[in-house]
Amino acid sequence: MHPFIYKRMVGAVDPAATAGDVVYIYDKAGRFFGQGLYHPVSQIAVRVLAHDDAPIDDAFWRAAIGRAVAHRRSLGLDETTDAYRVIHAEGDRLSGLVVERYADCLVMEFFSLGMYQRRALIGRLLSEAMGPPPAASAAGGLAVQWRIVHRADAQIERIEGFRIDRGGEVANRRSVTIRESGVRYRVDVAAGHKTGFFCDQRDNRRRFAGLCRGRDVLDVCCYTGGFGISAKAQGGAAEVVCVDLDEAALAVAGENVRLNNVRVKTVHSDAFIYLRQMIENRRSFGAVVVDPPKFATSRPALDDALKKYHDLNRLACQVVEPWGVLLTCSCSGLVSRDRFFATVGHSARAAGRKIQVFDESGAAADHPVAPECPESGYLKCLWLRVQ
């Protein structure tokens, strides 16, 4: 049962219910269905938290957060990185909340007013479940606390009716440095995309790097250079070019290049324009990764998004050397695996290239998927050999 109950599905509401309240949910026949966070204005009228009648109290939140943290601990992530997703919204049965750990910082991203209203409680319970940050040990047992940052998309704030204070401590320390399999990255926790970094691609970055030794590599829509820098620092790539239209992100990518003491070229350009230039110049690469932003932001935008995925992959196929590698990604939850697969196939044919799909992957294991909410498995990655 999907955790979203849309406004159009609601027949009647208790007049006493206010935005952010926990409400009981009943089906058309009057049978108890569950409990969730209510919002009278949002299109998602209720975000379901539980299907039993146990109280949604401090004990509920402590148990839910504790389970999420325990799952991440079981993955052994702390041995190789200090950047990972601690809470994955619907995947952890906590719809409306995402939490990332970046070094000694916990970034909480809110998608619902109800979650935002409980930010202090959630932050306290998160700190308890995580234990003291590693800096506490380095400081000789001093009471070092997690630094907690609140984030939300401006459109979410407008729809849900809250506004995050973006001043204070964040203004004094926006950037943190994280480690991932021997590579270091700076993360802008205040203004970077989403929560500042894309932890979901961690395993894919490592695997892609392993395919790049001695190859020229192109990282399209590189953001802060994750794939390209990893390909150089870990994978021993020859020449690496990172392309993005976001100047702020590209500036951080430049910092990451210097931080890892590698030679990587960063290019400020629209991805479509750059790929067309490379085709015109007959420039090709042994390994190409295409990881664009979410094209399908709503159902009405789906057809246009699929056209963009088609055009982007059609161009990307043309800059891959014969039998080179193309890793192409979609982070649009509304685009199904089958539709993305078909779109990439059509784009290759339109480019006059044949492809072999040698694997498929998604987000790293700290992004669990709830089967009843397929959007929680939003990331789709196809690994191709291009003939």
Image (spheres, grey):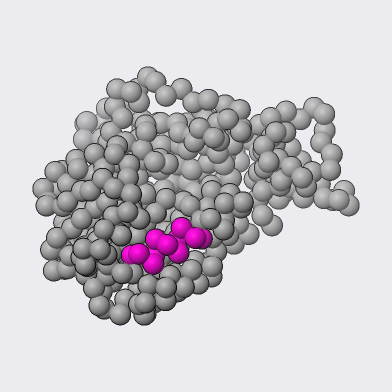
Visible residue check, residue 93 = no
User: Where is residue 175, by image quadrant?
Assistant: top left
Does the stretch in magenta take in 33? no
Q: Name the outermost residue toward the top.
A: 168
Return the residue nearer the eye: 298 or 261.
298
The residue that appears at 26% across and 45% down in the rendered structure is 268
Please tell me how many numbered marks the rendered image carries.
0
Does the stretch in magenta take in 311? yes
Where is residue 45? Give x, y as percent: 70, 40
The residue that appears at 69% across and 30% down in the rendered structure is 19
Q: Name the outermost residue toward the front.
A: 280
Q: Where is 309 relative to 174, above or below? A: below
User: Where is residue 63, by image quadrant?
Assistant: top right
Where is residue 48? Give x, y as percent: 67, 46
Where is residue 300? Give x, y as percent: 61, 51
The residue that appears at 27% across and 64% down in the rendered structure is 279
The quadrant in which the N terminus is found is bottom right
Return the residue nearer the eye: 357 or 125.
357
Q: Examine the residues drawn in magenta and state their main secondary structure.
A: helix
Side of 272 where 1 appears, left or right: right
- Magenta region: which residues? 306-316
The quadrant in which the C terminus is found is bottom left
Q: Where is 63 relative to 1, above or below? A: above
Visible residue check, residue 363 = yes
User: Where is residue 372, by image quadrant?
Assistant: bottom right
Where is residue 297? Give x, y as percent: 54, 48
The residue that appears at 51% across and 56% down in the rendered structure is 305
Return the residue nearer the eye: 26 or 219.
219
Q: Name the outermost residue toward the right.
A: 29
Side of 137 where 127 appears, left or right: right
